[in-house]
Image (tube, rainbow, N blue to C red):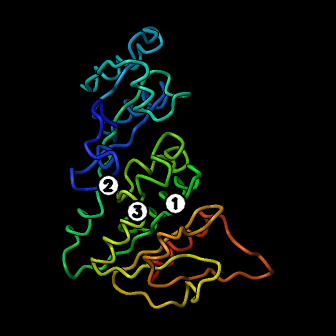
Amino acid sequence: MSPREPADPEGTEAAGPSPKDRFVTVYGRKPVLEALSDPALQVDKVVLAEGADQRAVRPLLDAARTRGVPVRRASAQRVKVLAGNGRQDQGVVADVIAPGMRTVERFVAELGHDAGARVVVLDGLTNPANVGMILRSATAAGLDGVLLPRRGAPSIDPLVVKASAGVAFHAPVLRAGTAAAGLAALAEAGFVLLGLDGGGRSSLFDVELGERVAIVVGGETDGLTDDVRGELHDTVVVPMASGVESLNAACAATLACFELARR
């Protein structure tokens, strides 16, 4: 989120990283005040709608002044655009610096040539609660990255932050325009790409894993997208008993995260 439009609205890297690769956008008076009140979070700026109720936003202004956080004014419509949620922004948004967030390209460059790495990739998920829980699980498992594409997945907003119990601010989030584009960059860097799928050819618990591996979790309803399937080296399944057909996406991702950590 930034008062300026991203130079590259389609999410390609040619024009440089998007502001969404640096910040978690928080909107609404209570979430913004909570962010400003948390000394562990670094707030880059607050954007306040012109004509906002001064009495209602006074605690925000006081907290921002105490922290030395700049407050910028913008039209109410502009704030809605920045928040991406016109019904719940309450005329205020804030950029919280996410220290663990980076582009896939930067992540790969920082790995070096010989280091192993474990990554989970989100493909087509739509439920912010699932995204937040996966961010929490992956961070708890010590994974090196969670690839959250700019398109085809929820942004990291207050709903995702709440589901992650605040971990989303610090999670090792990797950004790419799409999941397929991010997977292509990982494959070029030597990652083996495995997709979680009910018809997978190997068990998640038995498949051979290389030094660098990424496991893809598909959407809640449709599973893996066709574009992502075209990038995969193989598919794996979580074996289940008693006729159970599938697991919730966040549950399956959590199993994958801790299996990667275990091995």
Image coords of residue 51 (percent x, y): 42, 9
Query: What residue type is disc 1 on?
Result: Ile
SS assignment at label 1? helix
For the residues labelled 2 and 1, the Cα–Cα distance comes to: 15 Å
Which kind of residue does numbered mark 3 sit on? Answer: Leu
- Tell me if residue 128 comes above or below residue 56 in the rendering: below
Please report the residue visible at 37 percent of the width from the left and 31 percent of the height from the top.
94
* Residue identifier under label 2: 100
Image x and y of residue 27, in percent: 45, 31
* Among the two numbered marks 2 and 3 on one chain, the one whose residue lies closer to the N terminus: 2
Q: Is 154 positioned to the left or the right of 113 in the image?
A: right
CA separation, marks 1 and 3?
A: 11 Å
Q: Earlier in the sequence, mark 1 or mark 3?
A: 1
159 on left or right of 103: right
Task: State which mark lies toward you, 1 or 3.
Answer: 3
| Relative height, residue 198 to residue 247 (above, below) | below
Question: Which image quadrant is residue 116 in?
Answer: bottom left
Rendered image: mark on residue 147? 3
* Residue at horizontal 50 percent and vertical 39 percent from the top: 158
Give the foreground label among 2 and 3: 3
**Marks 3 and 2: in contact by CB < 8 Å?**
no
61 lies left or right of 262: left
Query: Residue 244's image quarter?
Result: bottom right
6 in relation to 117, above or below: above
Circle 3 — which element?
A: strand
Q: Amino acid at mark 2?
A: Gly
Q: Quadrant of the N terminus?
A: top left
